[in-house]
Amino acid sequence: MSPRHRRAAARERLEIDPIACAGHGLCAELLPELVELDDWGYPMLADDDAVPPELAALARRAADACPTLALHRRRVAAGPPRPDLRRSPTAGQ
C-alpha cells in the first residue's frame, strides 16, 4: 500500500490530557460540534472522538489554540471502531 493510500485510510481522533487541562474552555468554543464542557468547565469529547473530515481544520485550530496543550489530534488507522472503555461491559444486563 502506498503512503498516499495509507494516509487516506487513516482517520483522526481527539484526545484530552486531563492532567494538563486547566479548564479554559477554548476548545469547546472553537469546536462545539465535538467538545462540550462539564459542570466545572472541563472539556468532554463526544462519545465517538473521531474527527469528521469536514471538521479537521477546526480540530487542528482548537488543538493549536489550547493554552496548556492539553488537546491532541491523533491519526489512527482506519478499521473497526474502538470499544468504549468508559462504560462497563456488563451495564444494562
Image (tube, rainbow, N blue to C red):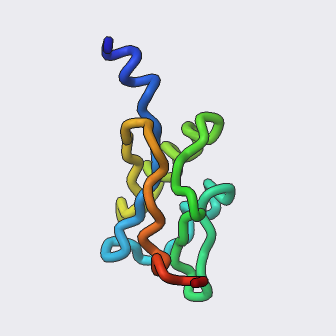
- Residue 78, x across and y down, in percent: 43, 36
Query: For the point 54% across and 71% down, which residue is it?
Result: 44
As drawn, is 25 to the left or to the right of 88?
A: right
Up/down of 17 relative to 31, above or below = below
Task: Looking at this view, name the residue that lies furthest to the bottom.
Answer: 40
Q: Position of residue 29 (x, y in %)?
A: 64, 62
Residue 32 or 8: which is nearer the viewer? Answer: 8
Residue sitting nearer the eye, 76 or 60: 76
> Which percent across, then down, holds residue 6?
36, 22
Q: Is residue 68 left or right of residue 8?
A: left
Residue furthest toward the front? 93
Q: Residue at x 41, y 77 (%)?
A: 22
Q: Quadrant of residue 35?
A: bottom right
Number of marks present in the image shown: 0
Residue at 44 percent of width and 27 percent of height = 9
For the C terminus, the quadrant is bottom right
Image coordinates for residue 76, horizontal then vertical, percent: 37, 41
Quarter of the image where the N terminus is located: top left
Which residue shows up at 32% across the image and 16% down it? 3
